[in-house]
Image (tube, rainbow, N blue to C red):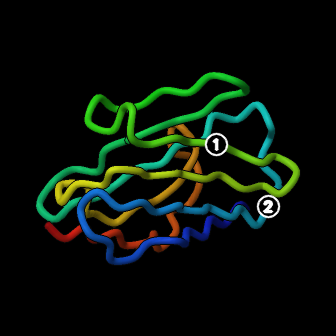
Amino acid sequence: QVQLVESGGGLVQAGGSLRLSCAASGSISSSAIMAWYRQRPGKERERVAFIGVSATSYADSVKGRFTISRDNSKNMVYLQMNNLKPEDSALYLCNSFPARFDWGQGTQVTVSS
């Protein structure tokens, strides 16, 4: 069973950057689509980005600011977040797309104005 551990969140000022990491304890196929999601208080979980073998896709709200990448040799997925905005504040989680693995605890991102 794959376990996912997210890290890299924190408190940052608007306009700042963070790089999130997702470590998978088990082996994930290099062809599996992996994604980053976020959960904001009172709102449904939303997918912000996903990455396939070579293609990526982003939610309109983060396009041009976030970059998803992966290192299959290390079973890692990353999310580089630039020009952060207060509305990006959320709990960030990774999973496959569609989500098939148990959710990790996520990593909290807080952006102050």
Write down the quadrant of residue 69 in the picture. top right
How far across and how far down the image is residue 98, in percent?
51, 37
Q: Residues within 10 Å of mark 1 (few under 14, many from 20)?
A: many
Q: Amino acid at mark 1?
A: Ser
- Left or right relative to 105: residue 12: left
Which residue, as the protein is rendered here, is positioned at the far front?
Answer: 15
Point out the frontmost of discs 1 and 2. Answer: 1
User: Depth check: 66 or 73 in front?
Assistant: 66
Question: Between disc 1 and disc 2, whose residue precedes?
Answer: 2
Q: Residue at x 28, y 63 (%)?
A: 90
Q: Residue at x 18, y 55 (%)?
A: 87
Q: Residue at x 70, y 45 (%)?
A: 70
Which label is found at residue 2? none
Picture quarter with the N terminus: bottom right
Q: Amino acid at mark 2?
A: Gly
How far across and how far down the image is residue 12, in percent?
32, 72
Q: Which residue is mark 2?
A: 26
User: Depth check: 74 or 15 in front?
Assistant: 15
User: Separation of disc 1 and disc 2 at Cα?
Assistant: 18 Å
How far across and how far down the image is residue 95, in percent?
55, 51
How far across and how far down the image is residue 80, in percent?
52, 51
**Secondary structure found at label 2:** loop
Which residue, as the protein is rendered here, is positioned at the far right?
Answer: 73
**Secondary structure found at label 1:** strand
Q: Which residue is mark 1?
A: 69
75 shown above or below 49:
below
- Left or right relative to 81: residue 22: right
- Left or right relative to 19: residue 1: right
Q: Residues within 10 Å of mark 2 (few under 14, many from 20)?
A: few
6 shown above or below 97:
below
Picture quarter with the C terminus: bottom left
